Image (cartoon, helix red, strand yellow):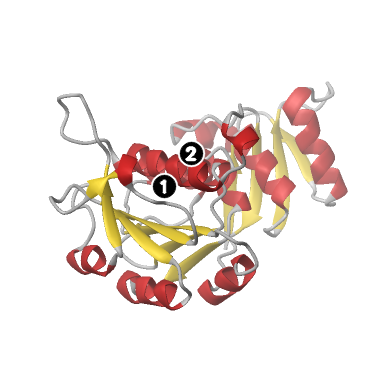
Amino acid sequence: MSELLVGQHAVFESLRAGRRNYYRLWLEGDGKSAPKGNLAEIVNLAKKNKIPTRHVDGGIFDRIRRAQLNPQGVALETGSFPYMDLEEILERAASKPDPLFLVLDHLEDPRNLGTLFRSGEAFGVDGVILPDRRAAGITPAVSNASSGAVEHIPVALVGNVNRTIDRLKKSNIWTVGLDLGPDAISLTSADLSGALAIVIGNESKGLSRLAREKCDFRVTIPMAGSVDSLNAATAGSIVLFQAFQARAPVEAVGGN
């Protein structure tokens, strides 16, 4: 089954990652003028990968816009997202002194998923774990929302998040749940160093009861405002940054 990635960031990062099967690159216009900037880089990557390129006015780009997406003059027909096996992800990260994982407990909004992947890629996540049912998967909308970051991160689909938390513990990976419960400790007091998996719950329900109980500890984000809570993507990104700070070299913390 083929998918259509749209937007310059998603297309460029997918080609740069080189993890999918690629079938055709679509460029908007008549092809009489040479592409410039990001589009030129995309075309060069397509040529290196021997991907057929076709120019078109309207057509597929009109359909993309009717779907309320901005193609930015480019679309890429690809194979489906290449999920990995959980054990393979753990094996690849085993050589790192402080691997960092993200476990998403039935998030449903592709935009939240995309934001967390973008933050995860920026802050050094070694793998993301998603349930294979009743949750958002990796779709073109997620790749677009992540600005293509999802194309670089190993992702595993699992049948049961709670059993996965147990599996992580067997690999000496601590699990921390993002929670608003009274027994959650302040994020500012939490030790997020070492091998760690951050567990983030559903947008409206939060962590499931069993996932909450299985986490080694739970953290909450202290806030001064009057709104009850941040959304899942924003809150998760804050925790990811704190984990990054706990393991990053001093010079990396002050990056762009």
The residue that mark 2 highlights is 145
Looking at this view, is 166 or 37 the one in front? 166
Q: Report helix, strand or loop for mark 1.
A: helix
The residue positioned 51% from the left and 36% from the top of the image is: 63
Q: Work out whether 83 lies above or below 42.
A: below
The residue positioned 74% from the left and 29% from the top of the image is: 39
Q: CA distance from mark 2 to mark 1?
A: 8 Å
Expressed as whole percent of the image width and height from the top left, the position of residue 188 reads 33, 40
Expressed as whole percent of the image width and height from the top left, the position of residue 167 reads 41, 77
The residue positioned 83% from the left and 21% from the top of the image is: 33
Q: Report helix, strand or loop for mark 2.
A: helix
- In the rendered structure, the answer to whether residue 152 lies left or right of residue 178 reads right
**Crowdedness of circle 2 by 10 Å Cα count: few (<14), some, many (20+)?**
many
Labels 2 and 1 touching (C-beta < 8 A): yes
Which amino acid type corresponds to the residue marked 1 in the rendered image? Leu
Expressed as whole percent of the image width and height from the top left, the position of residue 30 reads 76, 26
- In the rendered structure, the answer to whether residue 235 lies left or right of residue 50 reads left
The residue that mark 1 highlights is 113
**Crowdedness of circle 1 by 10 Å Cα count: few (<14), some, many (20+)?**
many
Q: Work out whether 248 lies above or below 230.
A: below
Looking at this view, is 130 or 63 the one in front? 130
Quadrant in which residue 102 is drawn: bottom left
The residue positioned 67% from the left and 58% from the top of the image is: 20
Which numbered disc covers residue 152? none
